[in-house]
Image (tube, rainbow, N blue to C red):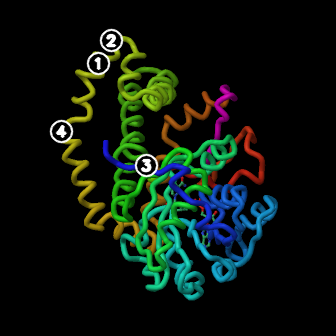
């Protein structure tokens, strides 16, 4: 319980007053960082590839937009928000050659620094602000006067003002309203990868799918199985979000609570713990990162195969049909890698082309 949290009063905005921040990329995180920092009074310059579809969106939002190299040259702080797998190429071609002493180079995830893919020159400060939430929330919560909590890290503070600038950045993003926690690039990278593999994405998706398949294979109606194993999950997670496992257990029936105690540890058993340790070991020794980098360098064949294999799973077909009648859920259908919101709740300029969680 000893970790120190940093709030607005711990972050002096003066460290970035009058400074220019280059935001490289305008996707899920990029649009939120650019708009929040702009609304916090900083001078923002969005750097994008010449043919990027995001240019029009950023311009519509009233932001200054230009080539990546120009944004880097104009800036005091450079935040890299292109996909992790594209960062090395963009860095080597347009960012690295234009960096100068005293600038602060920033990341929202430690992957490329931690695994040695990007090695910035010595005179440049290197830091991280990693919001613990998807970009569209980072933006909408900020607009509502709140903030998304974040991790921050200082990898290198050559100038001596790196740490103060990283904290000022977190404040301008709205994150110090909720609280930010100090970490290292190693800790952030390893725990982020483990969390998304073990529970947030991998574990939860596998649990939902297997529970659904078990019911359907036993002859129960797929629609009912969908409500039971996917739809209701949100209601349960919302209880945990507000009051932890205790509040979830307080809210469900005693029967559900008893089943939780006696069957939960049989489903997620000691073998699963051993597998989790193995998954964590492969993250820490770099073998997961190597595999993912090689996959990207060889055309993403396995990734695309796995993606299409799950896309038309029965739970997805049944779910899309049922959600289409529940308009208040703001249902979204994903076709071949693209998210399309059926209800256009988010205004065009506020909405990024892609919004990915985790
Ligand atoms: P994204 O895929 O949503 O957006 C990337 C954007 O970069 C694109 O919209 C485009 O504008 C640009 N881009 C793509 N390829 C490019 C290329 N080759 N050259 C130049 N520009 C290119 O990415 P994201 O999810 O916002 O992730 C950005 C960073 O933020 C990553 O380091 C990621 O780990 C981190 N992060 C993401 C989230 C999240 O919720 N999405 C949360 C925390 C941290
Ligand atoms: Mg994450």
State the residue in front, 16 or 318.
16
Of the residues under marks 4 and 2, which one precedes in the sequence?
2
Figure check: 210 above or below 174: above
**Residue 270 — which label?**
4
* Point 43% across, 29% down: residue: 240
Alpha carbon separation for disc pair 3 and 2: 39 Å
**Residue 23 — which label?**
none
**Residue that carries the numbered disc 3 in the rendered image:** 5
The kind of secondary structure element at disc 1 is helix
The kind of secondary structure element at disc 4 is helix
* Point 43% across, 67% down: residue: 154
> Does 220 sit left or right of 98 as displayed?
left
Of the residues under marks 4 and 1, which one precedes in the sequence?
1
What is the magenta range?
Answer: 325-334
Of the residues under marks 3 and 4, which one precedes in the sequence?
3
State the residue in front, 243 or 81.
243
Alpha carbon separation for disc pair 1 and 3: 37 Å
Alpha carbon separation for disc pair 4 and 2: 24 Å
């Amino acid at each position: 319980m000893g970790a120190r949290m940093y709030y607005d009063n711990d972050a002096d905005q003066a460290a970035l007053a009058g400074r220019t921040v280059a935001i490289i990329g305008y996707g899920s995180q990029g649009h939120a960082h650019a708009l929040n920092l702009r609304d916090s009074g900083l001078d923002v310059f969005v750097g994008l590839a010449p043919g990027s579809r995001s240019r029009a969106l950023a311009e519509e939002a009233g932001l200054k937009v230009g080539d990546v190299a120009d944004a880097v040259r104009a800036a005091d702080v450079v935040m890299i928000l292109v996909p992790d797998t594209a960062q090395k190429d963009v860095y080597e071609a347009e960012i690295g050659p234009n960096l100068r002493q005293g600038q602060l180079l920033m990341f929202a995830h430690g992957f490329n620094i931690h695994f040695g893919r990007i090695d910035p020159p010595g005179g440049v400060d290197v830091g991280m602000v990693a919001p613990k939430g998807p970009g569209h929330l980072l933006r909408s919560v900020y607009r509502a006067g709140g903030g998304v909590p974040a991790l921050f890290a200082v990898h290198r503070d050559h100038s001596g003002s790196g740490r103060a600038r990283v904290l000022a950045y977190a404040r301008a993003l709205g994150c110090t309203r909720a609280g930010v926690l100090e970490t290292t690039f190693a800790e952030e990278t390893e725990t982020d990868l483990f969390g998304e593999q073990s529970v947030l994405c991998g574990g939860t998706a596998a649990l939902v799918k297997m529970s659904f398949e078990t019911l359907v294979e036993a002859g129960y109606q797929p629609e009912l199985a969908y409500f039971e194993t996917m739809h209701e999950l949100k209601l349960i997670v919302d209880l945990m979000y507000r009051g932890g496992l205790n509040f979830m257990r307080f809210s469900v029936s005693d029967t559900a609570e008893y089943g939780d105690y006696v069957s939960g540890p049989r489903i997620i058993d000691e073998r699963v713990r051993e597998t989790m340790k193995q998954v964590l070991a492969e993250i820490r020794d770099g073998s997961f990162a190597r595999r993912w980098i090689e996959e990207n360098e060889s055309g993403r064949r396995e990734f695309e195969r796995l993606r299409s294999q799950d896309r038309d799973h029965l739970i997805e077909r049944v779910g899309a049909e049922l959600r289409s009648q529940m308009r208040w859920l703001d249902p979204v259908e994903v076709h071949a890698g693209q998210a399309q919101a059926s209800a256009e709740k988010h205004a065009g300029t506020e909405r990024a082309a892609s919004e990915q969680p985790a």
